[in-house]
């Protein structure tokens, strides 16, 4: 790997000067307390800034402190997170808040090493909190930063490898100015999000780092970073059944382990079924008033894809209703449905509006 040693100071200077002029105004930047920085960083994992903004405000209102989060009821927590996806993040946040209450006097610890001991906090998040909230000179290396530095230094190392991430973490630690570690890390993230963007499309013509970027100068930037192919996702076929009885719909809780653990969902078969097969399954227990075919849908998780068919069945009970039946307003206020079921929740809304 070539290094920019002779340009390091100028590079940092150019980066910070650009950031001072161009940093976006974001809700969590205006008051970067450790709690706010942590919440925003967890939300921003795998989620766009624009999508996070309303969630951040809502979360802060519902759980303004670490202690309120540590004591949150799981259903309330998931309801506030509803639609943001990757629900493991929010259950880890509650665990992390409890760890802080128990081991760190009710506060997030200030060092990179201590932060790493907490649930859901990996190297990037620990670096972000330590540098932005506590102004510690430690790198925060995520996919954006790996891409930017791979281009700047013409690194051909595979950025999906842990060894590469570690190497960059150590290398970037040497760039961090002691007086502005918070601005340095945020500036790198900002350059990655706005200028040195992914998919062979860096905007070098307007980049403040071009004069210090070996990838730009050599014409290799567009071919970087090197990232080995991801494993193909497993495809699972599902049939989602939205069961309705007057002004109520049926929900069930998912298993405690695995994908979307402990969250609510509509009734689901783990294979494709025809309308006739679905009706046959329910007709012993219920009188079927009508069955509507819904749109097919697809939801992509990190390792799995759900390909879904859907039906809405309106039923009348032959006996007492059993299981969890919730009213429209309860579904809105209390029960969170993962975004995997978005198409079917919308279909239910339309049905209820008729
Ligand atoms: S000059 Fe181009 S490749 Fe280099 S950091 Fe800027 S946008 Fe990225």
Image (cartoon, rainbow, N blue to C red):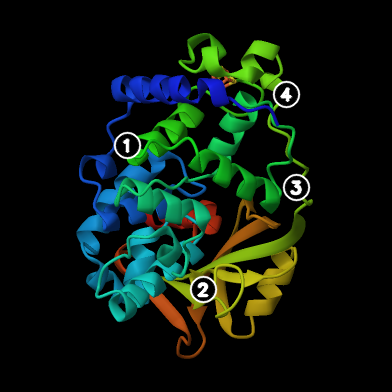
- Sequence-first tag of 2 and 4: 4
- Most extreme residue toward the front is 6
Q: Nearer the viewer, mark 1 or mark 4?
A: 1
Where residue 223 is drawn, which disc sits there? 4
**Image point 40% across, 42% down: which residue?**
51
| Whether label 1 touches label 2, CB < 8 Å | no
* Vertical comparison of 159 with 1: above or below: below
- Sequence-first tag of 1 and 4: 1
| Whether label 1 touches label 3, CB < 8 Å | no
The answer to whether residue 327 of the structure is visible from this angle is: no
Where residue 74 is drawn, which disc sits there? none
Residue annotated with mark 3: 230
Q: Nearer the viewer, mark 2 or mark 4?
A: 4
**Image point 20% across, 45% down: which residue?**
31
- Sequence-first tag of 1 and 2: 1
Question: Which residue is more in the foreground, 142 or 5?
Answer: 5
Badge 4: residue crowd in 10 Å (few <14, some 14–19, many ≥20): some
Indicate the secondary structure of the residue bearing disc 1.
Answer: loop
Residue annotated with mark 2: 315
């Amino acid at each position: 790997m070539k290094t920019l040693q002779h340009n390091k100071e100028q590079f940092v200077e150019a980066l910070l000067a650009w950031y001072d002029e161009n940093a976006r105004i974001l809700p969590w930047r205006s008051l970067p307390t450790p709690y706010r920085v942590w919440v925003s960083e967890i939300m921003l994992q795998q989620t766009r800034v624009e999508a996070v903004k309303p969630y951040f405000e809502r979360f802060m209102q519902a759980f303004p402190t670490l202690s309120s989060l540590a004591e949150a009821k799981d259903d309330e927590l998931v309801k506030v997170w509803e639609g943001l996806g990757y629900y493991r993040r929010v259950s880890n946040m509650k665990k992390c808040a409890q760890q802080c209450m128990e081991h760190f006097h009710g506060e997030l610890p200030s060092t990179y090493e201590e932060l790493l001991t907490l649930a859901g906090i990996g190297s990037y998040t620990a670096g972000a909190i330590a540098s932005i909230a506590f102004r510690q000179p430690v790198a925060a290396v995520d996919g954006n930063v790996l891409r930017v530095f791979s281009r700047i230094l013409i690194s051909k190392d595979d950025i999906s490898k842990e060894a590469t991430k570690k190497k960059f973490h150590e290398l970037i630690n040497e760039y961090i100015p002691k007086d502005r570690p918070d601005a340095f890390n945020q500036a790198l993230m900002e350059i990655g999000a706005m200028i040195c963007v992914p998919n062979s499309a860096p905007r070098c013509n307007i980049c403040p780092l071009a004069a210090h970027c070996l990838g730009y100068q050599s014409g290799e930037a567009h071919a970087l970073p090197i990232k080995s192919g991801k494993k193909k996702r497993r495809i699972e076929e599902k049939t989602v059944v939205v069961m309705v009885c007057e002004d109520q719909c049926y929900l069930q809780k998912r298993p405690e382990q695995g994908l979307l653990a402990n969250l609510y969902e509509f009734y689901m078969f783990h294979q494709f079924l025809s309308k006739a097969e679905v009706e046959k399954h329910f007709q012993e227990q219920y009188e079927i008033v009508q069955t509507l075919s819904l749109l097919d849908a697809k939801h992509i998780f990190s390792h799995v894809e759900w390909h879904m068919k859907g039906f809405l069945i309106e039923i009348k009970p032959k006996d007492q209703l059993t299981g969890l039946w919730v009213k429209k307003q309860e579904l809105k206020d209390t029960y969170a449905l993962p975004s995997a079921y978005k198409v079917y929740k919308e279909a239910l809304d339309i049905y209820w509006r008729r």
